[in-house]
Image: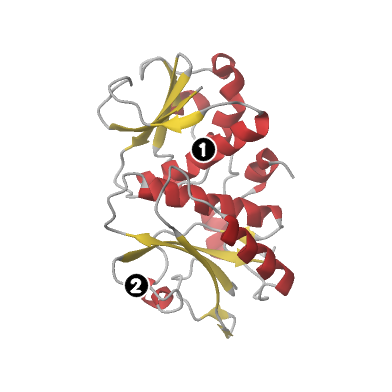
Amino acid sequence: MTIIETIEKRKSVRNYTGEPLRKEHITLITDYIAGLKAPFDAPPIRIQLIHTRQESGRSKLGTYGFIGGASDFLTLVYEKNGSFPLMEEAAAYVFEQLILFCTGLGLGSCWLGGSFSRKDFSEPVQLKSGEILRIVSPVGYINSKSRFTETLLGSKGKHLSRKPFESLFFQGDFNTPLSKEAAGIYEKPLEMVRIAPSANNQQSWRIVLAGNSLHFYQHLSVIGFNAIDLGIALCHFEQTCKESGIAGKFEILNNQTPEKKGEKYVISWTE
């Protein structure tokens, strides 16, 4: 399965069979985690696969009713007061790589930023002083029977629930929407950004194509996951570019990017 096919296939799964991950899947996931390297020369990021015992069909790790039947979880931990400026973006980037890998294995997952008990999860991940448990995701075998929460939160198709292309991407400055035709070779990478998961489907990022560079911004909102959302978007963009043979790299530019109130410049893609 290509990265594009995997991104298009991935969806938030909230209902699981309760079956623990089989040994072959545990091995594949833990080996993949061991080989992950965070982007942007970020400090170490800790990702763990943890198992929880089911009691009466419910996990002992709290997810406030948002997740049903999950026996295994992926957790994302890093230093919360570090000086590295792109810590959250880098952490989200590498975690989304793992989510897509699990999708390719046919497993379900779901980004959880707030709807889980940090107290419950802190013990199995052995959270240290100065660390933050930022994200949790169930991972496991999908239960096709709908639950009320699944139906309520997933009533729209993924692509239909996302903002249109021209609302997210711009040409030259923030005043000119970018058409798919004008995007050229970047049409597919940008489309993979458009359908990326984000907190409450806020899609809290914007991109400006200016000359041969694309400038990535946090679209500031009250949700509080702007950097996490952007990190997922950066992962989708770069991994699609790599698969498509589009050369380039991420770098932070100084005083060369369009400005707009409510849009925080973060990084650029340059040839």
Disc 2 residue type (three-letter): Lys
Front residue of 67 and 193? 193
Marked residue nearer the N-terminal end (2 or 1):
2
Q: At which x and y percent is residue 243?
A: 66, 34
Q: Which residue corresponds to mark 1?
A: 162
Report if residue 146 is visible in the image: no
Q: At which x and y percent is residue 183?
A: 55, 18
Disc 1 residue type (three-letter): Arg
Residue 163 left/right relative to 157: left
Residue 258 left/right relative to 2: left
Report if residue 91 is visible in the image: yes
Q: Of the residues tagged 2 and 1, which is closer to the observer?
A: 2
Q: Is residue 176 above or below residue 136?
A: above
Q: Residue at x 61, y 26 (%)?
A: 246
Mark 1: secondary structure: loop
Q: At which x and y percent is residue 226?
A: 36, 44
Q: Which residue corresponds to mark 2?
A: 128
Residue 227, image quadrant: top left
